[in-house]
Image (cartoon, rainbow, N blue to C red):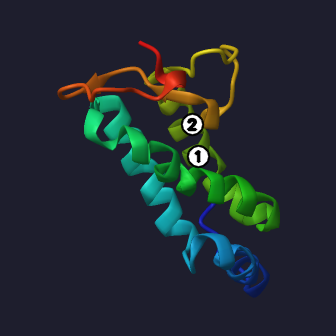
């Protein structure tokens, strides 16, 4: 896709998604959630801090937001950001393993970081069996 200017409909689709999901996620933007997903992917790739394990599910909220918002965006918005999202998802998949008891083909919400750094807590979540 070239660098065509986005239309009012394109911008409205992003605002509509943000407003529609605000009750559960707060008022956020597509750019903010893409950046949050990229930061989380980088954290997972570098080694996920063991102290954050119990917050990990909540940290995935940026990817959940993207999944819920994606169908609301116009084709032009999706086309403009799809390659970036696909690349982040692929990096995440490489840096994670399925949660214990989940199939290897489980989506991003059923995976945990492959590399966990820091001193392990007394108890890991059951699905994080190492």
Q: Give the left or right position of residue 37, taking residue 82 as reference.
A: left
Disc 2, SS: helix
Q: Quadrant of residue 3?
A: bottom right
Question: Where residue 89 is drawn, which disc sits there?
Answer: 2
User: Going by the picture, which residue comes out furthest to the left?
Assistant: 119
Task: Please provide percent x and percent y for residue 39.
Answer: 37, 50
| Residue lying at 70% horizontally and 64% vertically, measured from the top left | 77
Task: Please provide percent x and percent y for residue 73.
Answer: 76, 67
Q: Of residues 120 and 78, which is closer to you in this image?
A: 120
Sort mark 2 into few (<14), some (14-19) or many (20+) by Cα contacts within 10 Å: some
Position of the N terminus by quadrant: bottom right
Q: Quadrant of residue 113?
A: top left
Question: Where residue 39 is drawn, which disc sits there?
Answer: none
Q: Give the left or right position of residue 68, taking residue 82 as reference.
A: right
Q: Give the left or right position of residue 100, taking residue 103 as reference.
A: left
Sort mark 1 into few (<14), some (14-19) or many (20+) by Cα contacts within 10 Å: some
Task: Please provide percent x and percent y for residue 81.
Answer: 62, 55
User: Going by the picture, which residue comes out furthest to the bottom?
Assistant: 8
Task: Please provide percent x and percent y for residue 79.
Answer: 71, 55
How many numbered discs, if any? 2
Q: Give the left or right position of residue 51, taking residue 123 as reference.
A: left
| Residue lying at 54% horizontally and 23% vertically, measured from the top left | 127
Question: Where residue 85 is drawn, which disc sits there?
Answer: 1
Position of the C terminus by quadrant: top left
| Residue lying at 74% horizontally and 84% vertically, measured from the top left | 12
Residue 1 appears in the rendering: no
| Residue lying at 50% horizontally and 52% vertically, measured from the top left | 58
User: Contact, CB < 8 Å: mark 1 with mark 2?
Assistant: yes
């Amino acid at each position: 896709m070239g660098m065509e200017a986005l239309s009012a409909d394109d911008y409205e689709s992003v605002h509509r998604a943000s407003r529609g999901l605000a009750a559960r996620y707060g008022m956020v933007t597509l750019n903010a959630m893409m950046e949050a997903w990229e930061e989380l992917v980088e954290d997972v790739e570098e080694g996920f801090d063991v102290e954050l394990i119990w917050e990990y599910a909540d940290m995935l909220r940026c990817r959940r937001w993207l999944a819920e918002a994606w169908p609301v965006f116009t084709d032009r918005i999706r086309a403009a950001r799809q390659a970036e999202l696909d690349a982040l998802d692929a990096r995440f998949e490489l840096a994670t393993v399925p949660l214990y008891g989940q199939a290897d083909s489980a989506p991003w919400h059923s995976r945990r970081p492959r590399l966990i750094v820091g001193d392990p807590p007394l108890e890991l979540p059951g699905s994080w069996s190492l």
